[in-house]
Image (spheres, rainbow, N blue to C red):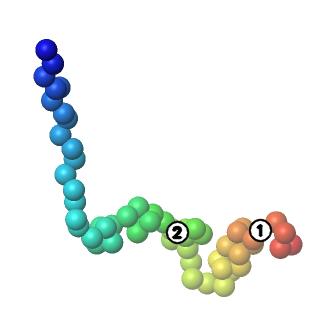
Amino acid sequence: MTSAPEPRSPKPPLIFDDPLDQQSSDDTDRGWGERPGTDADAAADLRRFLDEKPPHHL
């Protein structure tokens, strides 16, 4: 005598939406080097440049 097959778990539904229409974490994350409330003057730009300059650019 054969046993009855076990019921299968339902498969997740297929979604055919355009993935590019959805917002990703890259769209909402702050980018590299962005700082809140930086001044637009030359002294602030120089300070930021010196703070973010890689060590091989001495």
Is 36 displayed left or right of 56 in the figure?
A: left
Left or right, 54 with respect to 41, comes to right
Quadrant assignment, res 52? bottom right
Foreground of the two, 37 or 5: 5
Q: Is residue 2 above or below residue 42?
A: above
> Mark 2 packing: few (<14 Cα in 10 Å), some, or many (20+)?
few
Pointer 2 residue? 31
Horizontal side, residue 4 vs residue 49: left or right: left
Which element type, helix, strand or loop, lies under badge 1? loop
Q: Nearer the viewer, residue 1 or 4?
A: 1
Task: State the SS at label 2.
Answer: loop
Q: Residue at x 75, y 71 (%)?
A: 53
Asked which quadrant contains residue 33, the reply is: bottom right
Residue 57 place in picture, x, y as percent: 83, 73
Give residue 26's position: percent from left, percent from top: 44, 65
Q: Amino acid at mark 1?
A: Pro
Residue depicted at x 23% and y 67%:
17
Quadrant (top left, top right, bottom left, bottom right) of the C terminus: bottom right
Q: CA distance from mark 1 to mark 2?
A: 17 Å
According to the picture, the residue beneath numbered tag 1 turns out to be 54
Q: Earlier in the sequence, mark 1 or mark 2?
A: 2
Tell me which residue sits at (13%, 14%) in the image.
Answer: 1
Residue furthest front as drawn: 1
- The residue under the point 33% across, 72% down is 20
How dense is the environment of label 1, judged by Cα within 10 Å: few (below 14), some, or many (20 and up)? few
Mark 2: which amino acid? Gly
- Marks 1/2 in contact by CB < 8 Å: the verdict is no
Q: Is 27 on the left-hand or right-hand side of 6?
A: right
- Is 54 drawn above or below residue 44 in the view shown? above
In the foreground, 51 or 23: 23
